[in-house]
Amino acid sequence: MADPIAALTPRVQQAMAAAFGADWAAADPVIRPANKRQTSADVQVNAAMAAGKRLGRPPREVAQAIVEHLDRGDLVEQVEIAGPGFLNVTFSSAWIARAATALREDDHFGVVRPPRQTVVVDYSSVNAAKEMHVAHLRSAVVGDSLVRTLEYLGHDVIRQNHLGDWGTPFGMLIEHLLDVGEDSDGARLLQSDPNAFYRAARGKFTTAEKAEPAGSAGDFDARSRRRVTLLQAGEEDTLRLWREILELSRVYLNRVYGELDITLTDDDIAGESSYNDELPGICDALQEKGLAVMSEGALCVFLDGYVGRDDKPLPLIVRKSDGGYGYPATDLATIRHRSLDLHADRALYVVGAPQHLHFQMVWETARLAGWIEGTEPIHVQIGNVVGTDGKILRTRSGDLVALQSLVDAAFAKSAEVIADSRPELDAQTRDVISHQVGVAALKYADLSVAHDSGYTFDLDRMVALTGDTGPYLQYATARIRSILARAGVVEPVGPIVLREPAERTLALRLLDFGAVVAQVGETLEPHRLCTYLSDLAQTFSTFYEQCPVVKAEDDEVRESRLALCHLTRAVLVDGLGLLGITAPEQM
RNA sequence: GCCCCCGUAGCUCAGGGGAUAGAGCGUCGCCCUCCGGAGGCGAAAGCGCAGGUUCGAAUCCUGCCGGGGGCACCA
């Protein structure tokens, strides 16, 4: 039965074909939500204006012809021509009621499965040498929501956690570990406070690197870089230390993923190191194809149209002058693997916006090398997170704010909120709920603004029970459940009947869910689902205000309204699930 | 210097070439306060500037102003 717009589309197309010729059968009818200030209709069909231009006929005349040829069936209640040629269409309430009733039997609530694709999603992808900070959180949250949504749509999704487990930072860590001694207090920091260990290593590295005259602060930078090449060459002692550090960070990552309900597991780890054996071959192939040349000791690809400062050609450095491989090399390997081996239809890279240029160059190189076949590589750009002062979140000492401190702060806040709103619950129940609420607050704040724009991190706002927040939506589901419980109903059975305008508006909104989810699957924009869910909750609120449910005037109406409540809750719960948010039964 | 993204209400953000640009928070007014107030209804307030394309532009194009980011061995 689908949604009314999907049902209307072919009818308008058929009308246009009948009126103006067969080649109009695939024309976009340009159906949009109606302008409520102009009309009480549900949608407007704007095809007549554009068609009038092509046909050389007045738009209103074209609109009239469409109306005359339109098979209204039992779908269209009313059509009227307005303004320059708008068609204002009102759907039949009986049709909406039947569709809403049918929606209750659909375990995917109107989501129509698109042609099945294989979609590789690279997300989280933190540097295993460092502690995670806010920017990593956003990639993980957005990526996980996309993964859940794509799977809901029936696609074959392959998660790829492209861990940074192979680069210069690991050279620093290993070298620092050797400096302090494997059994020292300094080394134990690696377990208790990995970020402090990293900072210590990083500090020595930058000090040595910037030292004037060269070497005055030691050779830590040079040793670290050499250590990376030893690692990449498979030197035994280096590998052993590398594995130890990596194991610790794997444990750390899994703790974070578990805490935040991110679906990544060890099976999804496909770190940089896993491509190591392919890198020499990639370099050889690029040289053989004449794409890569040596420049200043490094193996580089120079692409047309890429210039850097001073108009000098901008290289993609595939192999560094010290023989090590940077991430251009590993990312060439990833796209080749995802296209030629995994046969991805789409390969998503949910990675920070600043890396856009890098991906453009890597993918163009891969195309020229013939390593992309039938795959659309897509950079899902993640914007920066800034504080309320408009700047990138940093601690007083200038470091990026560690993820854990934000997560802890969010949980502390949500615990306050729950303690305040539900003091009668026992502590253990409150703990569970406040954890779910904290996760919802963090994730929804990340997801509800476009992923490529920066967003302002504001704890107080994101945990609020009012406004466009995750906790608000959770609360909505809990309240609805409470209404059903009050009515003594587990699963209402009666058909949905629509008498009041607020009932009709709610039912219509419920029918939009499938199209919204499908759109998110195409445009990869979870914030559209957030907007929808938030609007649905508000629409429900108006309905609930205007239509008594438990105290409805008769049993038929009561049963119908309970069914609307039940359906709204189910859609909210599933929708939140696609965002990676669990809806508590009570809160 | 070149390239990319972004300037929408007091604040945080939506806005798939269509009619008089929306939401949340905040402010003001009214209503309900009976199913857990997540209240409901309404008001004030805005597309950085200047051109262009179009029947029609917040949306597409150009220039300028302002903000963020990127541009050879970090990822």
Image (cartoon, coloured by chain):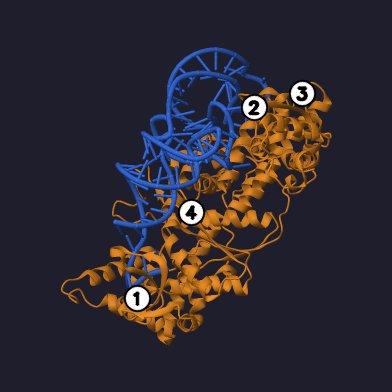
- Which residue lies at the image location 45% right of the left edge and 76% below the top edge? A244
Which label is found at residue A177? 1
Asked if the residue under mark 2 is in contact with the one under mark 1, i.e. CB atoms within 8 Å, the reply is no
Chain coloured blue: which letter? B
Q: Which mark is residue A260?
A: none
Q: CA distance from mark 1 to mark 2?
A: 61 Å
Left/right of residue A122 with respect to residue A504 in the rendered view: left
Task: Return the disc, 3 or 1, that comes first in the chain's sequence.
Answer: 1
**Percent x, y of residue A167:** 40, 73
Q: Amino acid at mark 3?
A: Ala
Tell me the quarter of the image containing the C terminus of chain A. top right
Give me the C-alpha separation between circle 2 and circle 3: 16 Å
Q: Which residue is mark 3?
A: A552
Mark 4 and mark 3 on one chain: yes
What residue is shown with label 4?
A138
Say which amino acid is labelled 4: Arg
| A474 displayed left or right of A311 | right
- Image x and y of residue A333, in percent: 51, 74
**At which x and y percent is residue A523?**
59, 51
Chain letter tied to orange: A
- Mark 3 closeness class: few <14, some 14–19, many ≥20 residues within 10 Å: some
Using the image, determine if residue A293 lies above or below residue B15: below
Q: Nearer the viewer, residue A530 or A544?
A: A530
Provide the residue designation for mark 2.
A542
Which of the 4 quarters of the picture holds residue A55?
top right
Label 3 lies in what chain? A
Labels 3 and 1 in the same subunit: yes
Along the line of sight, the residue nearer the viewer: A410 or A105: A105
Q: Identify which residue is drawn at 41% across, 77% down.
A: A325
Q: Helix or strand or loop: what does disc 1 sit on? A: helix
Residue count near mark 4 (Cα–Cα under 10 Å), binned few <14, some 14–19, many ≥20: many
Q: Name the residue furthest front.
A: A56
